[in-house]
Image (tube, helix red, strand yellow):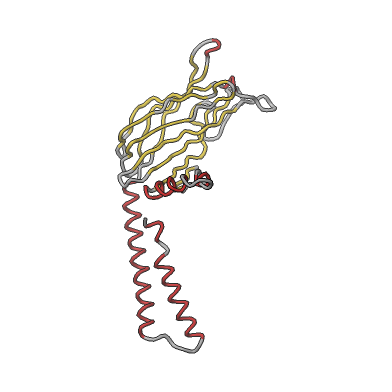
């Protein structure tokens, strides 16, 4: 609840300061009690800042950071069943804290015909600075992608990773992948495999109390859908 109450001491300080300034403008110098109130407000703000720094250190010590590595691209199947496979071999926690109830998922995209297919991967726990070989496979049907005006085919989709830290906060990491049809003239920025590009990777952090509040707001008839896409972005990696 600290995030929701951080402004309270500052608000109290400015209220007291405003009252004292009004007295000074009217020609009345602050009394000893009012100077004591100002000192108390400064002490409260100082205590809050120290508490915030300590809490930030605790949160950082518990924060996992999940990355997917060793990407490859290959073909699978023959004839009409032929499709491409994008594979990431390893999942690694490069953060300071353990990741609990880790879930890796990518939406199965269809446009009359399938475009992507991915089976959800689950891990009970991944300790800090540890990695696990999982051989995650994403099936890609670029032949079902509509080309642009120049005949170029590009498929973009997200991969989402959910996990919880030891402080009960949920971390949602999203990989934005772009897969291009291979040809001699294809080159993408930030390539992780031939014709496969990794865009921005963002991590969203939400506290348990915030998730419960959103869940309660979503249940309100008529206005619940307004809170379906609320996000607090903690880290953004180019």
Q: Where is residue 88 in the image (x, y as percent from the top left)?
A: 42, 27
User: Residue visible at 66% across and 27% down?
Assistant: 148
Residue 14 in the figure: left or right of residue 181: left
Q: Where is residue 156 in the image (x, y as percent from the top left)?
A: 55, 31
Q: Residue furthest right?
A: 149
Q: Relative to residue 222, is residue 10 depicted above or below? A: below
Q: Which residue lies furthest to the bottom in this view?
A: 27
Q: Relative to residue 12, is residue 176 depicted above or below? A: above
Judge by depth and name the residue closer to the eye, 173 or 96: 173
Q: Position of residue 22 (x, y in %)?
A: 49, 82
User: Residue visible at 52% across and 22% down?
Assistant: 140
Residue 214 in the figure: left or right of residue 179: left
Q: Relative to residue 93, is residue 55 depicted above or below? A: below
Q: Count the marks.
A: 0
Q: Which residue lies furthest to the top in this view?
A: 79
User: Residue visible at 40% across and 56% down?
Assistant: 3
Q: Relative to residue 227, is residue 105 depicted above or below? A: above
User: Residue visible at 39% across and 47% down?
Assistant: 212
Q: Where is residue 218 in the image (x, y as percent from the top left)?
A: 47, 45
Which quadrant: the N terminus?
A: bottom left
Quarter where residue 111 is shown: top right
């Amino acid at each position: 609840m600290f995030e929701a109450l951080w402004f309270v001491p500052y608000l109290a300080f400015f209220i007291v300061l405003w009252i004292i300034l009004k007295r000074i403008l009217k020609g009345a110098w602050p009394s000893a009690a009012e100077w004591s109130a100002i000192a108390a407000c400064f002490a409260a703000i100082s205590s809050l800042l120290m508490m915030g720094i300590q809490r930030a250190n605790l949160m950082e010590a518990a924060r996992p950071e999940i990355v997917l590595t060793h990407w490859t691209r290959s073909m699978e199947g023959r004839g009409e069943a032929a499709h491409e496979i994008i594979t990431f071999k390893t999942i690694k926690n490069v953060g300071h804290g353990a990741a609990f109830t880790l879930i890796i998922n990518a939406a199965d995209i269809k446009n009359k015909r399938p475009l992507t297919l991915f089976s959800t991967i689950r891990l009970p726990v991944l300790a800090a600075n540890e990695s696990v070989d999982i051989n995650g496979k994403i099936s890609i049907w670029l032949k079902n992608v509509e080309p642009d005006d120049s005949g170029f085919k590009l498929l973009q989709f997200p991969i989402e990773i959910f996990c919880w830290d030891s402080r009960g906060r949920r971390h949602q990491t999203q990989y934005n992948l772009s897969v291009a049809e291979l040809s001699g003239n294809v080159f993408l920025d930030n390539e992780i495999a031939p014709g496969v590009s990794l865009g921005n990777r963002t991590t969203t952090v939400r506290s348990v109390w915030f998730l419960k509040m959103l869940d309660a707001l979503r249940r309100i008839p008529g206005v619940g859908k307004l809170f379906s896409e609320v996000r607090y972005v903690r880290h953004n990696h180019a």
